[in-house]
Each structure stands twice: as structure tokens, then as C-alpha cells.
Image (cartoon, rainbow, N blue to C red):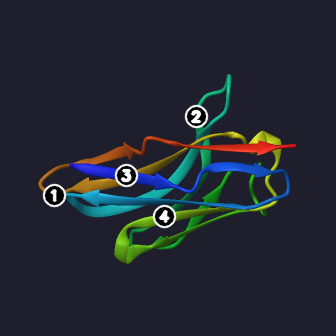
Amino acid sequence: QVRLVESGGGLVQAGGSLRLSCTASGTIQMINAMGWHRQTPGKQRGLVATIMWLVGADGVTNYADSVKGRFSISRDKASNTVYLELNNVKPEDTGVYYCQLYAQLTGGGWGDYWGQGTQVTVSS
């Protein structure tokens, strides 16, 4: 019903940049928000950044304190794609980055949907 396809992960040196993308497809009637979370070894999955879709909060972004000023989230509403620009990356940014979609499906209710994850590794 919903498919999230992520791309852009890889190996990058500390101080470098990387761009992740995630495209949502399927029987989506309305999107509330899309975002990125990451899971680092030994830790729970946590928020990196989100961007709102709905009228009244359209385009509003939210970032984890650890990435403010370095990461930037953006989107292309026409293609239901969200991007995460990672700049000045640090070794502690290493982890699996998961795309998240909060949406209402056609004929259904609201729900959270997740991508398969993309690995980002930052070398020092």
C-alpha cells in the first residue's frame, strides 16, 4: 500500500557532505509529515529532522539539537520526496537513517510508515 524508497547513503569523511532522498508512493491520500530518524549502534532510533506537509504548518521543520546548523531537510511535494542534506558530518552521525512518513491512506486511517533504512558511515 505504501512504499518508501531511500537512497544516498554511503561512506563520507568527517567534515564532508551527503544527501539522502526518500520517495513515498502508494495509496496515499494525505501526508501530514515526512522525516528522517537514525539508529546508531547501541542506541534507540531517534529523530533527526521532520518537515510538515499540512496547511497551517506547511513547510515547518524540526531538527534534533545535535544536527541543527549542519543538516537541512527539504521536500518536493509533487513527487512526495523528502531530502536530507548532511553537511559538516561527524563520526557520531554514523548510523542507519530511516525515512518516516505520517500519512492517511486512501480509504484508511492515519499511520506511520518507515523505509528500509540507508547506512551512513562517517570516517574520522
* 36 sits to left or right of 53: right
Instruction: Quarter of the image for the C terminus: give it.
Output: top right
Q: Earlier in the sequence, mark 2 or mark 3?
A: 3
The residue under the point 48% across, 50% down is 99
* 65 sits to left or right of 46: right
Q: Amino acid at mark 2?
A: Arg
Residue 11 % position (x, y)? 70, 47
Q: Residues within 10 Å of mark 1 (few under 14, many from 20)?
A: few
Residue 57 % position (x, y)? 48, 70
Q: Earlier in the sequence, mark 1 or mark 3?
A: 3
| Residue at numbered disc 3 | 4
* 64 sits to left or right of 83: right
Residue 27 % position (x, y)? 19, 58
Residue 79 % position (x, y)? 36, 72
Q: Nearer the viewer, mark 1 or mark 4?
A: 4
Q: CA distance from mark 4 to mark 3?
A: 10 Å
Q: Secondary structure at mark 1?
A: loop
| Residue at numbered disc 2 | 45
Q: Amino acid at mark 1?
A: Thr
Camera-nearest residue between 124 and 96? 124
Badge 2 vs badge 1, beta-carbon distance below 8 Å? no
Q: Amino acid at mark 4?
A: Val
Q: Secondary structure at mark 3?
A: strand
Q: Residues within 10 Å of mark 2 (few under 14, many from 20)?
A: some
Q: Which mark is residue 106?
A: 1
Q: Is residue 108 above or below residue 60?
A: above
Q: Which mark is residue 82?
A: 4
Q: Secondary structure at mark 4?
A: strand
